[in-house]
Image (cartoon, grey):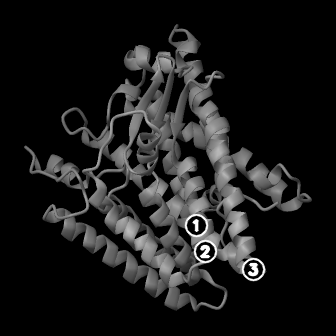
Amino acid sequence: MQRTDTKVYTGNNRIASIDFLRGLVMILMALDHVRMYFGYGTWYAEPTNLATTTPLLFFTRWITHFCAPVFVFLAGASAFLHGTRKASIKETAWYLFTRGVWLILVELVIVNLAWTFDITYSFHILQVIWAIGVSMVTLSALVFLRNGSVFAVGMALVFGHNLLDSITVQGTSAWDFIWYALHQPKSVFIDSTHIINFVYPVLPWIGLMALGYVFGALYRKDFPVEQRRRWLLIIGVCATLLFLALRAVNLYGEPHPWQTQDSPAFSLLSFLNTTKYPPSLHFLLMTMGPALIFLSVVEPAGRRLARPVIVFGRVPFFFYIVHLYIIHALAMLMLLYKGRDWSEYILSARGIASGSLSNFGLGLEAVYLLWILVIVLLYPLCRWYQKYRENSPPKWWVSYL
């Protein structure tokens, strides 16, 4: 069995810049999740709501916007490079299909349990692992097309999905559920005891993974490094400039136009406050443009890049699963320290609806300290797992982490 993480190789060698970028976004992702579990009243407040946020809170959330797009895009690149090591397109397609189905199951069982600690599974949250899984299943069909056709599909979905913003549904029919999964984020109460939260509608993520798949061709063993860096820089700069141009005039690609605020600082926040669920064209240009520029700039550093960050980037799936359980467990301990019932952080459907955690949490300074603690705790675990996986004979369970 093949591994399900998003490793990227050139030949038999790791590409340090890819691992480094992925490691950075994993670290930032942990900040967002620590904020969610420890920030005051986080489950019932939106940090990008300009009426209630502060600049520090806004940017604590905004910087983590880079995580999901980078991770999905690099998963597509990894899929392409994995295909170069397969004997046939059919083998590549089967690999992507089985890995995608596995990731969907992981989201529904392992990741949901990490988020909620609710063994009754009354609160289902469909997030980034689900989106990657569905995107991989879709990509397993797209790989039979020429790269130009895959690119066209990716561009059509990334640039065109905002044309569908006006289509909304509110019901619980099968077609409604399909639309929630594809393009409309929605929390659906199945009954008084069960909720399905469609956080990551998949259409734009499928498009982004398809573009990542085509992008993987830049990392073929025979592709000149300087030419790759030049293409990364050109594409990254163009994407960033296109974001600035479209956003400046509130043109197509974002359902929430920015507006001048009472202060220049909040006007900037409004400008940067693009839609993540589902990711608008502006959101994807805003995040992927700088990410590609970053890849171009750091590649010459190679293995001189910070090793702890690279370690996280080499075991992203393991990091993702373990960090959720650690953060959630620490949040329960904090409840006990505050003299409250630890079971308040069992996020069942009834528990979320009760609002019991609305008066729990810490200030941002404490959140940042706890984030550092979580990263320190994760490093030896990730380092141990990286060494174990590299030095031990293949085992079936290792292939899934």
Looking at the image, residue 55 lies above or below residue 353: below
Q: Quadrant of residue 373?
A: top right
Verify CB contact (< 8 Å) between mark 2 and mark 1: yes
The residue sitting at 40% across, 52% down in the picture is 65
Q: Is residue 176 left or right of residue 75?
A: left
The residue sitting at 53% across, 57% down in the picture is 24
Tell me the residue that label 2 is attached to: 143
Residue 204 pos. (x, y %): 42, 59
Q: Is residue 277 left or right of residue 151?
A: left
The residue sitting at 75% across, 59% down in the picture is 3
Q: Is residue 95 left or right of residue 123?
A: right
How far is the residue under mark 3 from the one under mark 1?
15 Å
In front of the other: 312 or 6: 6
Tell me the residue that label 1 is attached to: 139
As helix, strand or loop, the secondary structure at mark 2 comes to loop
Tell me the residue that label 3 is attached to: 88
Looking at the image, residue 306 lies above or below residue 146: above
As helix, strand or loop, the secondary structure at mark 1 comes to helix
Which three-letter amino acid code belongs to the residue tagged 1?
Leu
How far is the residue under mark 2 from the one under mark 1?
6 Å
Residue 186 pos. (x, y %): 39, 37
